[in-house]
Image (cartoon, helix red, strand yellow):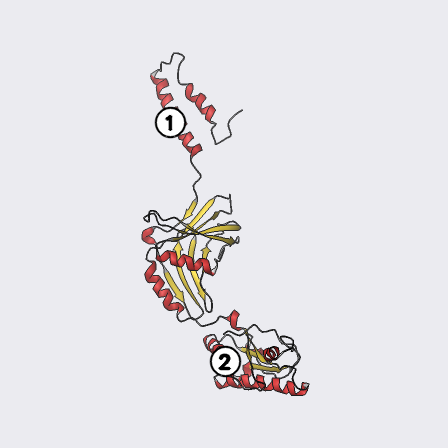
Amino acid sequence: MLPEKGVPDTAHRAQVLAAGTDICGIHSPTSLLGSTVRSLFFLTSLLFISAPVMALSFQTRLENAQWMVAGDQFECRLTQPVAGFGSGEFVRRAGEAAVFRLNADEPWMSAGSATLLAAAAPWQPGRGDINLGSVSVQVSAGVPFNSSQEQAGRLLTGLLEGRSPLVRHRTRAGGESLEVRILPTRFKPAYDEYLACTAKLLPVNFDQIRRSQVGFPGEGAELDDLSKAKLDIVLAFLKADPTVNHIELNGHSDNSGNRLTNRELSRQRALAVQAYLVAHGVAGERIDVRFHGERYPLVNNSSAANRAKNRRVAISLSRVPEAAVKPTAAPETAPATAAPAPA
């Protein structure tokens, strides 16, 4: 059977090599030259067959490696460009720990689980790579994955020790081995700059603050110190992000007393929150005030502790077109369920 096209068969090459020798084992000059050429071809082919398939590796040259820091009150980024691939970066949002991710200029990586390592440097003998587990890769240009916060923390510690974040996976086309390596060169000065950025982050991000609430431990409508502290966090975010231009306040009560009394009490609580926000610079026309009495409890009013949870004002932040911003004060619809307020 003929060998496969493009990949010479070993036995067939051996026969070709043997053809340069006569029966007596004596070589003519011509046959000797041909035999030598065929021998070289034979050995080269054997090396081609036996050599392992090399990984497709992306790494910036050591002398060109650099770190860049950028950010604001909402997010800080520590980035290293990777030649031919895109970049690797640590991203920390306000109110969260950092994650590590790759930014791919092209969709190099196939879908599936990639391996994330804190790889030892070649100049660190005796130190092995640290396997940090897997990350789930999505097929797309842009951001193929985000690490966990724990993985990112261990990568940052590794970089301070001279280790490299290393991602091992497969290519989307052909399934070949693929590696993306980030270098620890010049990391410490950039890391210090990154820490200075994170020190200025807000205590929460929009996803955390868009649904919050303040409680009323007593049976009245007065704001206590904890409620004011939570409202101060809301105020700080509104000041930092003026695109958040609409606030909805939904007042609630427990089921103590009659319904009319409870409805009025829920109104007073919502108005107390509104007054605090307005006193600290929020335009009144950006606030909708609604009150619902005991209609929408968070939990069953079966105990004093549960009734305290139901005495609350839920706060919803949003971005709406300017023409749609107008205040209302009617309990017309059920309010959205609020997430727990940031501590």
Q: Estimate the x, y position of residue 314 in percent, counting from the top left.
A: 58, 78
How packed is label 1: few (under 14 Cα within 10 Å), some, or many (20 or more)?
few
Quarter location, residue 214: bottom right
The residue sitting at the top extreme is: 24
- Which residue type does callout 2 highlight? Leu
At label 2, counting other C-alpha atoms closer than 10 Å, the crowd grade (few under 14, some 14-19, many 20 or more) is few
- Helix or strand or loop: what does disc 1 sit on? helix
Q: Nearer the viewer, residue 99 or 7?
A: 99
The answer to which of 300 and 94 lies nearer the viewer is: 300
Which is closer to the viewer, label 2 or label 1?
2
- Residue sitting at x 51%, y 75%: 244
Image quadrant in which you'd find residue 42: top left
- In the displayed structure, would residue 238 be above or below residue 42? below
Provide the residue designation for mark 1. 40
Residue 115 place in picture, x, y as percent: 47, 50
Left or right of residue 239, residue 248 in this image: right
20 above or below 155? above
Q: Position of residue 94 (x, y in %)?
A: 46, 69
Q: Which residue is mark 2?
A: 226
In terms of depth relative to the viewer, which is nearer, 220 or 291? 220
Label ID, residue 88: none
The residue that appears at 45% across and 46% down in the rendered structure is 178
